[in-house]
């Protein structure tokens, strides 16, 4: 089996700028719910965790579902 065949689980489909934005939003969401007396603490942690996963891995499953990517195209030689 070649390396290109099969299902790839983590395919990078986010640009570095978008990854930094998602990480910043995740930190803000988690910090705001942590420092306020909010009943939305658990959902905010789930949302923040998902955003951090997306930022670290560069993979968004919603983008993948719709065939969308913000990664720059590789330059052809």
Image: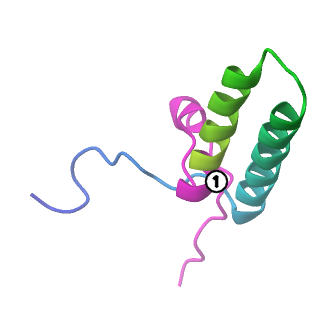
Residue drawn where x is 57% and y is 55% of the image? 58
Q: Which residue is identified by label 1? A: 55
Q: Position of residue 11 (x, y in %)?
A: 45, 52
Q: Is residue 35 above or below residue 14?
A: above
Q: Quadrant of residue 75?
A: bottom right
25 left or right, relative to 48: right
Q: Residue furthest bottom?
A: 77
Q: Quadrant of residue 2?
A: bottom left
Query: The N terminus is located in which quarter?
Result: bottom left
Toward the viewer: 69 or 14? 14
Q: Position of residue 62 (x, y in %)?
A: 58, 31
Q: Quadrant of residue 46?
A: top right
Residue drawn where x is 54% and y is 48% of the image? 59
Helix or strand or loop: what does disc 1 sit on? helix
Here the colouring is rainbow
Q: Position of residue 76 (x, y in %)?
A: 55, 77
What span is colored magenta in the figure?
54-77
Residue drawn where x is 64% and y is 59% of the image? 71
Q: Residue furthest top?
A: 39
Toward the viewer: 17 or 66? 17
Crowding around mark 1 (Cα neighbors within 10 Å: few <14, some 14 to 19, many 20+) is: many
Q: Is 76 inside the magenta-drawn segment? A: yes
What is the tally of numbered marks visible in this picture? 1
Q: Is 31 inside the magenta-drawn segment? A: no
Residue drawn where x is 57% and y is 41% of the image? 60
Q: Position of residue 51 (x, y in %)?
A: 66, 42
6 left or right, relative to 57: left
19 left or right, relative to 58: right
């Amino acid at each position: 089996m070649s390396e290109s065949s099969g299902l790839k689980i983590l395919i990078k489909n986010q640009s570095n700028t978008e990854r930094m934005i998602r990480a910043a939003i995740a930190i803000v969401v988690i910090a705001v719910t942590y420092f306020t007396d909010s009943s939305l603490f658990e959902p905010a942690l789930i949302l923040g965790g998902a955003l951090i996963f997306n930022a670290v891995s560069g993979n968004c499953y919603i983008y993948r579902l719709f065939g969308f990517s913000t990664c720059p195209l590789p330059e052809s030689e």
